[in-house]
Image: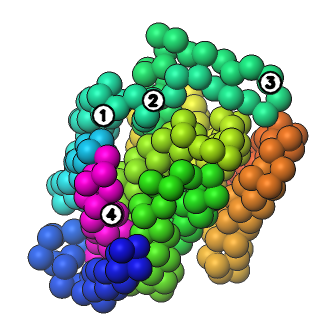
Amino acid sequence: MLELLLALTTMVSLGVCLLAGPLGVVLDVVDCPSASGGRKRHARPTPMVGGFAVIVPALLALAMMALAQPGFALLGGAVLVMLAMGMVDDRVGLGAGKRLVVAAAVLFGLMALLPAFTLTSLRFTFLDTPVVLGAWALPFTLVSVLGLQNAVNMADGKNGLVLGMGLVWTVLLGFFAPGEMVPLLSVLAVAQAVTLVFNLRGKLFLGDAGSYSISVLLGLASIYVYNTSPAGLFADMLVVWFFLPVIDCLRLIGSRVWRRQTPFAPDRTHFHHYLHAFTPRWRYGLALYMTLVIVPSVIVAVYPPATPLLLVTLLVFYAGLYAYYARRTASCYALFARR
């Protein structure tokens, strides 16, 4: 059955990717470049249908899994709402407040109905006993998933980033996941790999439909695996996995609030923008970004006791790289202003 599901996944993902242009026009989700000097600097109008190439097969897998465990149908429903909300945002643009209210309501309902998707305690590699969240369990879990959703959406500014990170996280989860999660994670891995090829070539974007739904699905899948993992997944290991997009999101929100700007307003001060600005081609920036995600994540998966040290190292390394690129950017702007 899994082989058939993976074959169907490949056909669906490949079909969506090959027909990305017509699908983008039919769904009215084509991203056009900005005028000279604008924020959107891709070369040509690009369909934002990558999310469908990943999520449609995932929904098929969840439907199959729901035959044995009906709770997975609710997970599929929540992901479908995120996909639909993202498509509306891609088409007409939703305010950050409306997106937050919809996502929070859907996730709250899912977590209230299915405790397997709620963090009730936190196990750390450096503590002998878990930290029990008690009454804070549901609010903490809700904020965590919403935070990951926004962090991934902010990282979705360069080809290959979100799909690359998603593929890494999916594979890592597979090493800790219980048997019932294997179909979903296998489908996600294949669908993201197929879509990644087209995304790297600039043939399609994920769009908000893709970033919202994929991030929420991976966030909830991580919680489920954490709660049911026979291999022992720790909370601080997940922090390492998701560290780079989350820390960059927190920095962006903090700096915008400090400047009295809207926290979720788009700009070009993300970490991946700095990498792109100071590397000969984006593939070098992508390679560096993915190295910062893959290497620490694999190390803590293989050797969990290294997690606290790696967290500190990542924080220092990120701060140093950001300060370097930000300083160079400021120097370039100052030089330009003097001319």
- At label 2, counting other C-alpha atoms closer than 10 Å, the crowd grade (few under 14, some 14-19, many 20 or more) is many
Q: Amino acid at mark 2?
A: Thr
Name the element at disc 2: loop
Q: Residue at x 50, y 56 (%)?
A: 179
Q: Amino acid at mark 3?
A: Leu
Q: Percent x, y for residue 46?
A: 32, 78
Report whether 146 appears left or right of 309.
left
> Which residue carries the number 3 mark?
127
- At label 1, counting other C-alpha atoms closer than 10 Å, the crowd grade (few under 14, some 14-19, many 20 or more) is many
Q: Amino acid at mark 4?
A: Ala
Q: Quadrant of residue 274?
A: bottom right
Report whether 319 appears left or right of 334.
right
> Which residue carries the number 2 mark?
118
Q: Percent x, y for residue 73?
A: 25, 48
> What secondary structure characterizes most of the magenta part?
helix
> Which residue carries the number 1 mark?
110
First-in-chain label (1 vs 3): 1
> Which residue carries the number 4 mark?
61
Q: Residue at x 71, y 62 (%)?
A: 294
Considering only vertical position in the picture, is 123 above or below 42?
Answer: above
Q: In this picture, which residue range is highlighted in magenta?
A: 43-69
Q: Percent x, y for residue 216?
A: 40, 47
Front label number (2 vs 4): 4
Marks 1 and 2, how far apart in space?
9 Å
Name the element at disc 4: helix
Marks 2 and 4, how far apart in space?
22 Å
Considering only vertical position in the picture, is 95 above or below 188?
Answer: above
Marks 4 and 1, how far apart in space?
18 Å
